[in-house]
Image: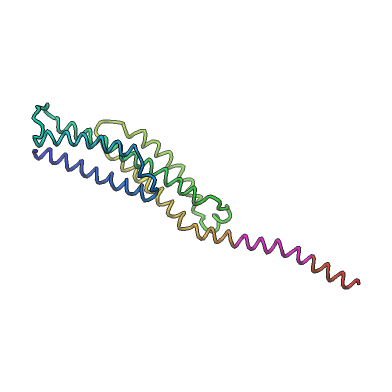
């Protein structure tokens, strides 16, 4: 294996390390993402190309291969790992949005307004992120240079979704506490006036008796 081949292999290993971090992030947000078949399939296909390249470079196979065989298969492996990274980000984005929806379910507007007013800005930002995510998905197969620029931008968008999910989680106790206090206040008001009317009626009846 020559120095150029070693450099290509190191670049691939670095990409794999990034993919591994994305998969771990996805599993932390949603443990069920471990069953993401699309990611596993791309990883398996990438491994197959890596094994072919290494078998030729290390002389494991005697069959003569054309020039550029090693680079060709590492390039294909890179493509599979990039697609796996996109699939992992797709799953992570969906998990974060579902998490936000679940956390905010049942929270009234008044509680949000008083305990977590920034949430309304998050709603607008989530809509914008959804649009940009769609653009990243459409761009992921454009070109053959396997640039990671679009992947980096996509990761930034999904990371922001994860941050917003954590913010919703952090504000949830305050919103629930607000709703509990509001419920108690309304209950007191609901019981106060009937009791007061009954008391006044009893007093008037006693005076007139």
Q: Which residues are magenta?
A: 181-197
Q: Nearer the viewer, residue 122 or 60?
A: 60
- In this rendering, the answer to whether 76 lies above or below 183 is above
92 with respect to 115 (left or right): left
69 with respect to 150 (left or right): left
Q: How is the image coloured?
A: rainbow
179 with respect to 53 (left or right): right
Tell me if residue 37 is in the magenta stretch. Answer: no
Tell me if residue 191 is in the magenta stretch. Answer: yes
Point out the residue furthest to the right here: 209
Q: Residue at x 42, y 47 (%)?
A: 96
Relative image position of residue 142 (x, y in whole percent): 31, 31
Q: Residue at x 42, y 45 (%)?
A: 95
88 with respect to 175 (left or right): left
- In this rendering, the answer to whether 199 lies above or below 34 is below
Q: Looking at the figure, which quarter contains the C terminus?
A: bottom right
Q: Main secondary structure of the magenta part?
A: helix
Q: Nearer the viewer, residue 39 or 109?
A: 39
Q: Residue at x 9, y 37 (%)?
A: 58
- In this rendering, the answer to whether 87 lies above or below 62 is below
How many dots with numbers? 0
Q: Nearer the viewer, residue 140 or 87?
A: 87
Relative image position of residue 54 (x, y in whole percent): 14, 36
Relative image position of residue 162 (x, y in whole percent): 40, 50
């Amino acid at each position: 294996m020559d120095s150029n081949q070693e450099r290509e292999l190191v670049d691939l290993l670095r990409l794999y390390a990034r993919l591994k971090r994305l998969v771990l992030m996805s599993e932390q947000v949603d443990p069920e993402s471990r069953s993401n078949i699309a990611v596993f399939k791309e990883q398996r296909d990438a491994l197959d190309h890596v094994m072919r390249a290494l078998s030729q470079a290390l002389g494991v196979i005697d069959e003569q291969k054309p020039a550029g065989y090693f680079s060709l298969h590492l390039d294909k492996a890179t493509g599979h790992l990039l697609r796996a990274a996109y699939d992992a980000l797709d799953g992570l984005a969906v998990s974060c949005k579902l998490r936000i929806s679940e956390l905010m379910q049942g929270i009234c507007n008044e509680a949000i307004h008083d305990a977590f007013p920034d949430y309304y800005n998050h709603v607008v930002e989530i809509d914008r992120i959804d649009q940009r995510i769609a653009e990243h998905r459409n761009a992921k197969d454009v070109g053959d240079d396997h640039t990671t620029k679009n992947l980096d931008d996509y990761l930034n968008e999904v990371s922001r979704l994860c941050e917003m999910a954590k913010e919703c989680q952090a504000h949830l106790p305050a919103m629930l506490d607000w709703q509990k206090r509001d419920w108690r206040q309304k209950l007191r008001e609901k019981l106060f006036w009937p009791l007061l009317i009954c008391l006044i009626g009893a007093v008037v009846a006693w005076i007139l008796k």
